[in-house]
Amino acid sequence: MKYKNKEGIELSYEGHKNDLSVQLVKDVVRESIKVGDENINTRYPMQGWLKVKNFLKENFSLDD
C-alpha cells in the first residue's frame, strides 16, 4: 500500500532514472532498510529500529 497524505496525495518515484535527486532519495531509503535488516536479528531488535529512525532523521533533517 502506498502512502497518501491527508489530502490524498501519493508520492511516486517510479521512473526518474536520470534525476539524481530522486536516485539519492532512493539510495537513502535503501540504506535505511539495510540498516534495519542488519540490526533486527540481534539480541535487542529495538536498537535496530532506533538506528533506522536516527538514520532517517539525520538524512532527511526531520528534527527541523
Image (cartoon, helix red, strand yellow):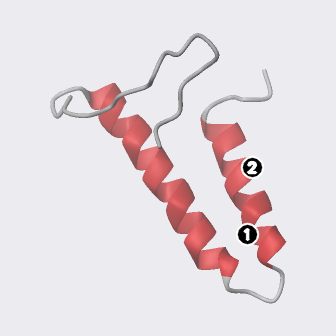
Which residue is rendered at x = 73% and y = 50% of the image?
53
The CA span between labels 2 and 1 is: 10 Å
Image location of residue 28, percent across then percent down: 48, 46
**Dot 2 and dot 1 residues touching (CB under 8 Å):** no
Image location of residue 24, percent across then percent down: 38, 37
Which residue is rendered at x = 81% and y = 89% of the image?
43
Compared with 15, 7 (above or below) is: above
Of pointers 2 and 1, the one earlier in the residue sequence:
1
Amino acid type, mark 1: Gly
Q: Which secondary structure, mark 2?
A: helix
Q: Which secondary structure, mark 1?
A: helix
Crowding at dot 1, Cα within 10 Å, few <14 / some 14-19 / many 20+, comes out as some
Q: Is residue 57 left or right of residue 35?
A: right
Report the number of numbered marks: 2
Question: Furthest residue to the top?
Answer: 7
Crowding at dot 2, Cα within 10 Å, few <14 / some 14-19 / many 20+, comes out as some
Amino acid type, mark 2: Asn
Residue bearing the label numbered 2: 54
Q: Nearer the viewer, residue 12 or 6?
A: 6
Report the quarter where the C terminus lies. Answer: top right
Which residue is rendered at x = 39% and y = 42% of the image?
26
Q: In this view, does 16 lie to the left or right of 38?
A: left
Compared with 8, 62 (above or below) is: below
Image location of residue 16, percent across then percent down: 20, 28
Question: Furthest residue to the bottom?
Answer: 43
Q: Nearer the viewer, residue 41 or 10?
A: 10
Compared with 38, 43 (above or below) is: below
Q: Residue 4 carries which label?
A: none
Image location of residue 34, percent across then percent down: 51, 66
Residue bearing the label numbered 1: 48
